[in-house]
Image (spheres, helix red, strand yellow):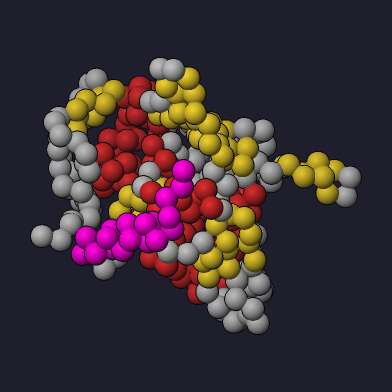
Amino acid sequence: MEKPKNTYIKRVQKILEEYEEPDLGFVSRSLIQTTLPHRDPGKVNQYSRTAGKLTLTVQPSITMINGKEVNFGIPYGSIPRLILTWLTTEIVKTKSRTIELGDSLSSFMKELDMLATGGKWGTIPRLKKQAERLFRSKVTLYVRHDYGVSEKELPFADERHFFWDAKIPEQNSLFKSFIVVSDKFYNEIIERPVPVDLRIIKILKQSPMAIDLYAWLTYRNSYLQKETLVPWEHLAQQFGSDYKELRIFKFKLVKLCEKMLDLYPAKLTAKDEGLLLYPSKTSISKKS
């Protein structure tokens, strides 16, 4: 049975009152445990990633256009992560399923810490492409239990209304662009938002794997009670399915840890067997 909506609102208000940083943001716990691809997986019919008992699957929108089958593709890289972080943060702050995207394309991209540039390889076409992939895709979460499997579809949006002029990104549109997130996604966020520092997300934005690693570490430290060794094989399964060799993934992850620890000094050590985590403060400190 669903809890009354005002219970959700009270929970969100409590979260906002607990944390003190001005750049407080939020991400989805499920999308920390299992992540979107770092690179384009190509025109595949399904992408999946597993962490422990949780499996995420993403299916692209495949539509007939002018008699031809069009595969819109799987969202990947930093842009979908920036969009989802911003969207999740707005859901928590506004306590609403209807999220306004700003008066212009430039203003929305500024919220994502992106400079609006045109051309074939500019940020505008890349943003539009990834947003279309993200909001068109079908996302499903599977949880394995000793007694069976739970399955939950998690559509990001029920409606999306974009009224921007890509040719004049700084021009205010006549109508406000907005998204109506799905009830399932809204409840997922309200039930289990993970606080992050948006400043760190923006600094790490060039590396989707670094964003994932940061969010995962601060989430793990929210409940870590004793030192824990996470094997490289498990980390590769969760973060590095794009890497064919474990040694390459290990090298990459260690380098990212060195960079990230300058921003978030979590206590950890790289061992031959895996990453040894020690109980640490979360990235966002609670009010004393």
Direction right: furthest residue: 67
Magenta-tinted stretch: 1-21
The image shows residue 23, relative to residue 136, as above or below, that is: below
The percent position of residue 197, horizontal first and vertical second, equals 29, 58
Image location (x, y in percent) of residue 141: 50, 35
Residue 199 shows in this picture: no
Residue 9: in magenta span: yes
Q: What residue appears at the point 31 percent right and 63 percent down from the top-left corner?
A: 13
Residue positioned 37% across, 57% down in the render:
7
Question: What residue is at 35 percent from the left and 29 percent from the top?
Answer: 235
The question of residue 244 being in magenta is answered with no
Q: Quadrant of residue 236?
A: top left
Residue lying furthest top: 146
Q: Which of the pair 191/201 is nearer the observer? A: 191
Rendered image quadrant of residue 217 = top left
Q: x and y percent of residue 112 in the render?
A: 45, 64
Front in this rendered view, residue 282 or 199: 282
How many labels, in total? 0
Relative placement, left or right, of 60 versus 97 is: right
Q: Nearer the viewer, residue 97 or 123?
A: 97
**In the image: residue 194, left or right of residue 115:** left
